[in-house]
Image: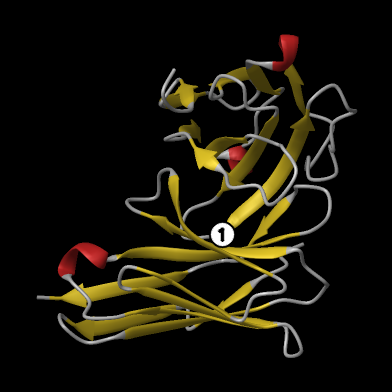
Amino acid sequence: SQQGEEDPQALSIQEGENATMNCSYKTSINNLQWYRQNSGRGLVHLILIRSNEREKHSGRLRVTLDTSKKSSSLLITASRAADTASYFCATGGSNYKLTFGKGTLLTVNP
Amino acid sequence: GAGVSQSPSNKVTEKGKDVELRCDPISGHTALYWYRQSLGQGLEFLIYFQGNSAPDKSGLPSDRFSAERTGGSVSTLTIQRTQQEDSAVYLCASSPGASGANVLTFGAGSRLTVL
């Protein structure tokens, strides 16, 4: 069964705007990760946040984690057309298994 | 190799045939995962290998699916008597499997079409 659920399922914005995607999960986690997928092929790791962290930054990416609400958000600032992709959250437990959500399809219009 | 290699990249087969999909993980990575992604859907966990431990097969959808990992390296996912609902992209990923969080490196996937 899917652990993470992303929201919204699809998001369309203009270049230069910020994009926010949310992820909710059900059970305890050790870490939460965000991945990006272009063209329905392999996923690329973007950022990892551990359960004892609340916020993390990487370039134009900002991830927050609220373990009390079992939720995370991914913010992409100053979006570019090249950011168009599907974004997935994945939750990691104590046994290295990663469980992925269904993803958010982000479209950035030039 | 530098990345995770999967073959074939595309496979078209007839219903009822068996198929084998291969994954060559990053050298030294002890953890290997297979996921399935149907059109427009998320990733469905299939099976996970960690070192010499017994694999976690809890995601395999039926007994027509099996996977092995020889010598702790290359893995083969076998689907017997394929059905049309098996059509999907099969993604393999590996991770170092060391202590701490596991970051997965994915292959480009094998797209399976069952006619």
**Residue B91: quadrant of the picture:** top right
The x and y percentages for residue B54 are 90, 28
Q: Residue at x 73, y 9 (%)?
A: B71
Chain letter of the residue beneath label 1 in the structure image: B
The answer to whether B52 appears left or right of B81 in the picture is: right
Scheme of image coloration = secondary structure
Above-or-below relation of A33 to A11 = above
Give left or right: position of B105 versus B86: left
Residue occupied by mark 1: B42
Q: Residue furthest top?
A: B71
Q: Residues within 10 Å of mark 1 (few under 14, many from 20)?
A: many
Position of A29 compared to A53: left or right? right
What kind of residue is marked 1? Answer: Gly
Q: Viewed as shown, does residue B52 lie left or right of B27?
A: right
Looking at the picture, does residue B42 appear above or below residue A41?
below
Is residue B89 something one can see in this rendering?
Answer: no
User: x%, y% of residue B69?
Assistant: 73, 18
| Residue at (42, 35) in percent of width and height | B108
Task: Using the rendered image of the protein, determine whether residue B11 is visible from the camera's viewpoint.
Answer: yes
Q: Determine the secondary structure under disc 1.
A: loop
A19 above or below A30?
A: below
In the depicted structure, whether residue A60 falls above or below residue A69: above
In the picture, the quarter occupied by the N terminus of chain B is top left
Residue depicted at x 28% and y 86%: A18
